[in-house]
Image (cartoon, rainbow, N blue to C red):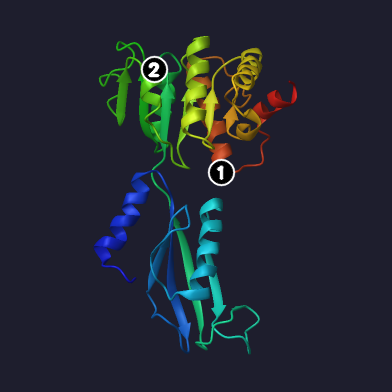
Amino acid sequence: MGLRPEEFYGRIIEELSKGNPVAIATLVSKEGSGPREIGASMAVTVSGEKIGTIGGGELEAIIIRNALEAIERGEPRKLKLALRRENVPSDAQPTNMLCGGIVEVFINVVKPQPRVIIIGAGNVGKPFAELGRLLGFRTIVMDRDEKLANPAKYPFAEQVFAGDFLAELEKIRLGPSDVAVVVYGEVETDYQSLKKILQHNPNRHVWVLCSRHRAKWMVERLRQEGVDVEKYKMFIHMPAGLDIKSSTPEEIAVSIWAEIICVLKNCEIPVKPLSIFKEQ
């Protein structure tokens, strides 16, 4: 590793606590000469920073590149690398290294427990939060009304905030696996919530429960106020929810979660809200 175990794993835990996934590359087999022994590990963060070492040089450069791709896709992978220029097996990737051996490296992606930030603790917010708990999401609930947003109603929530949550939104930093959902139900509050999330958490997914007409109005207002909505259009989802003909708060919550799961897992179902950007 190049680091004491407590330091190596401590830094991984630190990244996970920030909501960031980490790739861990482990040397699982070696034939001939190589810079490290089987079991040597190195971690790679979302920013490309390495934690520990697995050999240095071109070997680590290739591993870091593959680790970042694995993080982006959320899938593990295995590499076979020839640490030489000649006599390279057909299933191995050649390098300019001169160690002479062949190594296999397994890259696993460790994902943090995702969070959902719920703006609005009313009719839809409650069943939505309950479903999020069942799906394994850490939950933060925000509302102006302490009768709606309180620990007694959301005992499973990591945080429940009642009051001026727009100011509180500025402090929250979403990780790649985290999402925000606006189900407050008041026009100006919904808009300001969306804007603050975009400003302080660029390239993070946010869903807004609203009509199609209001969605188009919010997109146009964002443009008028200088927000580059084209840059964020892959991350803004409104009207929130897949079209499952939902009508009750519980059904609406299911429809939104269905779309969230679809987006986070890159499913092939069309993400319909993107069309609101084409209609301007």
For residue 224, above or below residue 74: above
**Mark positioned earlier in the residue sequence (1 or 2):** 2
* Residues at circles 1 and 2 in contact by the CB criterion of under 8 Å: no
Picture mark count: 2
Question: To which residue does mark 2 refer?
Answer: 121
Q: Residue at x 51, y 87 (%)?
A: 101
Q: Amino acid at mark 1?
A: Lys
Q: Residue at x 42, y 82 (%)?
A: 35
Residue 52 occupies quadrant:
bottom left
Q: Secondary structure at mark 2?
A: loop
Task: Name the quadrant of the C terminus.
Answer: top right
Q: Nearer the viewer, residue 122 or 168?
A: 168
Neighbor class of circle 2 (other Cα within 10 Å; few <14, some 14-19, many 20+) is: many
Q: Residue at x 63, y 24 (%)?
A: 243
Q: Position of residue 127 (x, y in %)?
A: 42, 22
Q: Residue at x 46, y 15 (%)?
A: 184
Q: Position of residue 196 (x, y in %)?
A: 47, 24
Residue 185 seen in this snapshot: no
Q: Which mark is residue 265?
A: 1
Task: Name the quadrant of the N terminus.
Answer: bottom left
Q: Amino acid at mark 2?
A: Ala
Give the left or right position of residue 263, taking residue 178 as reference: right
Q: Position of residue 93 (x, y in %)?
A: 61, 76
Give the left or right position of residue 12, taking residue 207 as reference: left
Calculate the distance from the C-alpha at mark 1 to the C-alpha at mark 2. Answer: 26 Å
Residue 126 occupies quadrant:
top left
Q: Which mark is residue 178?
A: none
Q: Position of residue 6 (x, y in %)?
A: 24, 62
Residue at the extreme right of the image, as rendered: 279
